[in-house]
Amino acid sequence: MSKKRIVKFEIYRYDPDRDERPYMQKLDVELEPTDKMLLDALVRIKNDVDDSLAIRRSCREGVCGSDAMNINGKNGLACTTNLLELKEPIVLRPLPGLPVIRDLIVDMTHFFNQYHSVRPYLINDTPPPRARAPADA
């Protein structure tokens, strides 16, 4: 039987309706053996420790990347970040360069506007050539 373990976190917190300015919240969180990925730990924090933590996650809903954040100084996805590969304390901040809506949630409007304006494929105005009949027909 695997043991629970205590993991140290420092999480960027900011609620513009309550807080004058952002601050870092330190937490010691007891994780279950089944908590393998950072997103598992964040859900545990939200459910068991502090339900005011604002995170975004849309796994299996076709919005990959919604749980993107700065993890120990590197941008990454919480759902694909293995907890065992992270040094403690695990420092979580919102993605840099984007306006913070609340805690780890950033406003992605500008990003998605730019994303939709880019067409990463060739656009050909010439119709495709007609198919020829096989030579031995």
Image (cartoon, rainbow, N blue to C red):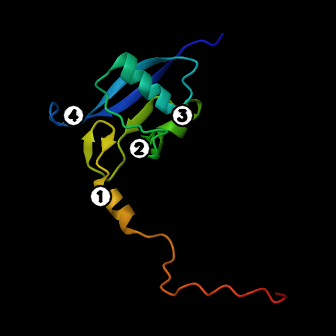
Determine whether the residue tagged by mark 1 lies in a helix, strand or loop. helix
Mark found first going from the N terminus, 2 or 1 = 2
Name the residue that disc number 3 marks: 86
Q: Nearer the viewer, mark 1 or mark 4?
A: 1
**Mark 4 residue type:** Asp
User: Mark 4 and mark 1 in contact (Cβ < 8 Å)?
Assistant: no
Q: Is 56 above or below relative to 74?
A: above
Please give the name of the residue rendered at 53% of the width and 85% of the height, measured from the top-left corner.
Answer: 127
Q: Which image quarter: residue 82?
A: top right
Mark found first going from the N terminus, 4 or 3 = 4
Q: Which mark is residue 66?
A: 2
Determine whether the residue tagged by mark 2 lies in a helix, strand or loop. loop
Q: Is 51 above or below relative to 134?
A: above
Determine whether the residue tagged by mark 4 lies in a helix, strand or loop. loop
For mark 4, does the 10 Å Cα neighbourhood hold few (<14), some (14 to 19), or many (20 or more) residues?
some
Q: Measure the alpha-carbon separation of dots 4 and 3.
A: 27 Å
Please give the name of the residue rendered at 17% of the width and 37% of the height, measured from the top-left corner.
Answer: 16
89, 110: nearer the viewer: 110
Name the residue that disc number 1 marks: 110
